[in-house]
Image: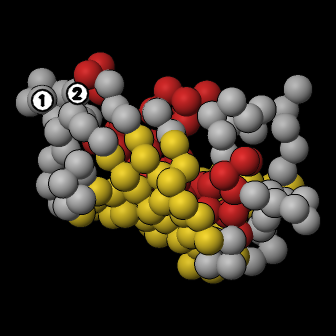
Amino acid sequence: MSDFDPKTFFTIDSPAAPEAAKHLGFELLDADVDRGWLRVKFTPRKEFLNPMGNVQGGFLIAMLDETMGPAVVVKSKGQYVSSSIDIATHFIRPVKLGTISTEAEVIRMGRSVAFMEGKLFDEKDRLCATASTSAMLTKFHVPE
């Protein structure tokens, strides 16, 4: 995939787009292949809210995961995908319904494991959560 273009690869209609990303409202905003960095927009639905009216934490973790994993795809120019080994998340403030943006970067990528960090921002661009993950690398192929 020498002509790797993240904006084409990560369209929601792509066969490579996970159903979870579609459910969360994934939209790629920007990517830097050399850094293994990307910025994503999510549009949560009211079904994602907890009884306090905040986006439930599990959905926020899923959004971070759906940003950190694709950072590996960006860094490897579409050659690898990642499967999380662990995810550590720190919640800083509650997130209300509205546009959420995330960014993630590959910190280190070896032959079989990658390490990524992510940040999640609310509609007012306030930092609301951070995460780090280690993940197993697998050669990418579109499932049939």
**From the image, which quarter does the N terminus lie in?**
bottom right
Q: Position of residue 36 (x, y in %)?
A: 63, 71
Q: Is residue 13 left or right of residue 15?
A: left
Compared to residue 69, the image places residue 75 above or below, namely below
Residue 104 visible at all: yes
Numbered disc 2: secondary structure:
loop
Q: Quadrant of residue 35?
A: bottom right
Residue at 69% across / 56% down in the picture? 6
Q: Residues within 10 Å of mark 1 (few under 14, many from 20)?
A: few
Residue 47 image point, x, y percent: 29, 19
> Residue at the spot x=23%, y=48% of the render?
123
Disc 2 packing (10 Å; few <14; some 14–19; many ≥20): some
| Residue 56 sits above or below residue 92 on the image | above
- Nearer to the camera, 138 or 22: 22
As shown in the figure, which amino acid type bears the numbered disc 2? Leu
Viewed as shown, does residue 36 lie left or right of 30? right
Provide the residue designation for mark 1. Answer: 53
User: Residue 110 occupies which quadrant of the picture?
Assistant: bottom right
Where 105 falls versus 67 (above or below)? Answer: below
User: In whole angstroms, how far apart are the C-alphas of marks 2 and 1?
Assistant: 5 Å
Query: What amino acid is found at the position of numbered circle 1 in the picture?
Result: Gly
Please tell me which residue lies in front, 55 or 33: 33
Element on which disc 1 rests = loop
Q: Are marks 2 and 1 in contact (CB under 8 Å)?
A: yes
Query: Residue at the spot x=22%, y=27% of the render?
Result: 49
Find disc 2 in the rendering and name its residue: 49
Visible in this render: residue 134? Answer: no
